Image: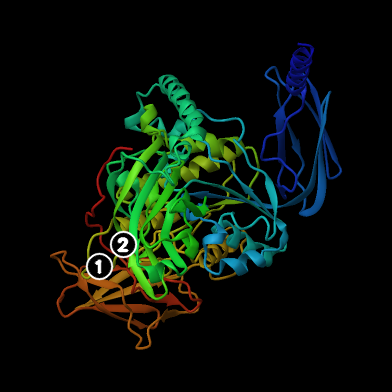
Amino acid sequence: MRQNLLLITLLFLVFFKSLGEVQLPKIFSDNMVIQRNTPVNVWGWSNKGENITITFNGQTVKTKADKSGYWTATLKPMAHGGPFELQVKGKSNTIALKNILIGDVWLGSGQSNMEWIIRNTNNAANEILEANYPKIRLFTVEKKTSFSAEKDLAGGKWLECNPNNIADFSAVAYFFGRKLYKELDVPIGLVNSSWGGTNIQTWISWDIMSEKEKYKDYDIKKLEESARDMTARQQRYEQALPNEKGMIEKWYSNPGEGWKNIALPKLWESTEIGNADGVIWFKKEFELDASKAGQPLTLSLGPIDDQDQTYVNGHLVGSSANYSENRNYTIAPNVLVEGKNTIVVRVSDTGGGGGIYGKPEQLYYQVGNDKVSLAGEWQYKPSVTTTEFGISNTGPNSFPSLLYNGMIAPIIQFPITGVIWYQGESNTGEAHKYRELFPQLINNWRGKWKKEFPFLWVQLANFMAPDSLPAESGWAELREAQSMTLSLPKTGQAVIIDIGEEKDIHPRNKQDVGYRLALAALKVGYNKDLVYSGPTYDRMEVNGNKAIIYFKNQGSGLQVKDKYGYVKGFAIAGEDKKFVWAKAFVDGDKVIVQSEEVQKPVAVRYGWGNNPDDANLYNKEKLPASPFRTDKWTGITEGKSEY
């Protein structure tokens, strides 16, 4: 009894001590980068009316907490340098943050291609090994959705850029920052606030989105009440996860009854499982003769979203928590048996798509030179899922502004140099809407930060099967919407129409993406005299049966990646609006486009398709021309649509 009283007393003292302590937001930590050449806000929480003293780099400023306990102070602009220590002193405690640099802070945001980590890029092992840049600092914002603007981030801390810290950081942000650091020789802070599969609506603040016709009558308080009920369901679901019956009943060695058929590979959202998160088990049997059972076996399952624990005949043979990593496991002969062998995969999905989702050719086992496909019929059995607890879609795309509130709003007081953005895949099919939303997002964020900072983005890569004939394309129209946003000041675009992959929405070449973004930053953000863009459409003239295309941003001149000098990727149409592939060639500072099938050209398109894999027009600085169309004919996503 005496021990219990002592414990309660200690907890009581700790609780009230924490209430009285000065606190900083999570964006402030050891190893951080503070923005140079601009006033710097320092803010936090304490007891109401408490006096706070901030000391940094020779400056001392004092402030006082308001009635709610919130306080803020401003440091004068400082030149780049460091390391320094930041000291924040209150009545009952002092916070001392160490190893702080002053330099340039860039925010990277968007969906999975911005989130994509270094370990899954081309040449990953060497990139990780060579990532020793102590003056580059990394901060990954913890994922968080919210119906109202949060005061602080859910989590995150600043890390030095070194081989121990870089592997799971945003590849695009890192390669971008590395180029800037080499060119500028100033400390670079990189903040990655991204979430795979998200649309642009969730990244725009509610004061903008609430003006849309679709949301004018929404009652946020009722939505928050509904969200609280859903949070309670979520808590019960999360409490069930550690005790999920699949592990307790050892389905990996004793599968039992109740399994249903399913075709794999495929995201389970596109099957009868539906839009569920949680733990689902998958099972597949295969036969081995005596000779093969006595040899090592390679098991390939492709990528699994999010986590897997893979068993063969009851033995754990491998596991991974990386949703984009290809699962390749080596099975020792002592695990295998002659006759029937059983693969059981426990898959845990925390959000978004889930399951064994790669390409059919990635699903196989191999013994020696014999490869046997495992694609096709498997069996599955749910263990703990969100649908079991009545949890509806509460993901980041379920309502506008959820990620702005949880992952952007808490840091808008933190000064930055600019933003890099890689998003749009989740908005293909609504390009007409994106024409409005993308500029609104840029102006929205600039307004919140009260600064017209550089905003740079990646145009969508080529993806999916190439068209055999010219066709309409939602991806092309989304790229067009991105290009149209260049009308805003201090914007730049990295065109990557030449590095996409037909069967993978996540190109592994993130080095060129970061490099091209950095070129745009050096021009737009730092006024460097360099060529930062490939050719962009200027105007068209018609001479007989020829269309003559003029370009801006030619750099040192137009160049074609073709040993015969022909420009590919052009289509041409007459008044009938029927496009056909065209012959094209460079003539000095212009491109001549024609086709025997079109005697009176009216419109020309270049690189217009989901995957214009033959587009080969560049400038001599090796930057690709941006896709374009000269017509304004209705496409597949034109017209008014809901938000």
User: Is 208 on the left-hand or right-hand side of 7?
Assistant: left
Quarter of the figure with the N terminus:
top right
**Residue occupying the point 68% across, 34% down:** 25
Picture layout, residue 320 above or below residue 449 = below
Instruction: Residue 285: tell me if it is visible.
Output: yes
Q: Which quadrant: the C terminus?
A: top left
Q: Secondary structure at mark 1?
A: loop
Describe residue 208's horizontal placement relative to residue 592 as left or right: right
Residue 467's mark?
Answer: 1
Locate residue 163: give its quadrant.
bottom right
Q: Is residue 331 visible?
A: no
Residue sitting nearer the eye, 158 or 560:
158
- The type of residue carrying mark 2 is Asn
Give the residue at x 59% y 40%: 449
Q: For the view shown, which residue lies furthest in the bottom direction? A: 564
Furthest toward the left, the residue is 576
- On residue 610, the disc is 2
Task: Compare residues 64 and 540 and report the one nearer the observer.
Answer: 64
Q: Assign a secondary structure to mark 2.
A: loop
Determine the residue positioned at 44% across, 41% down: 351
Q: Amino acid at mark 1?
A: Asp
Q: Is residue 616 above or below residue 640?
A: below
Classify residue 493 as left or right of residue 615: right
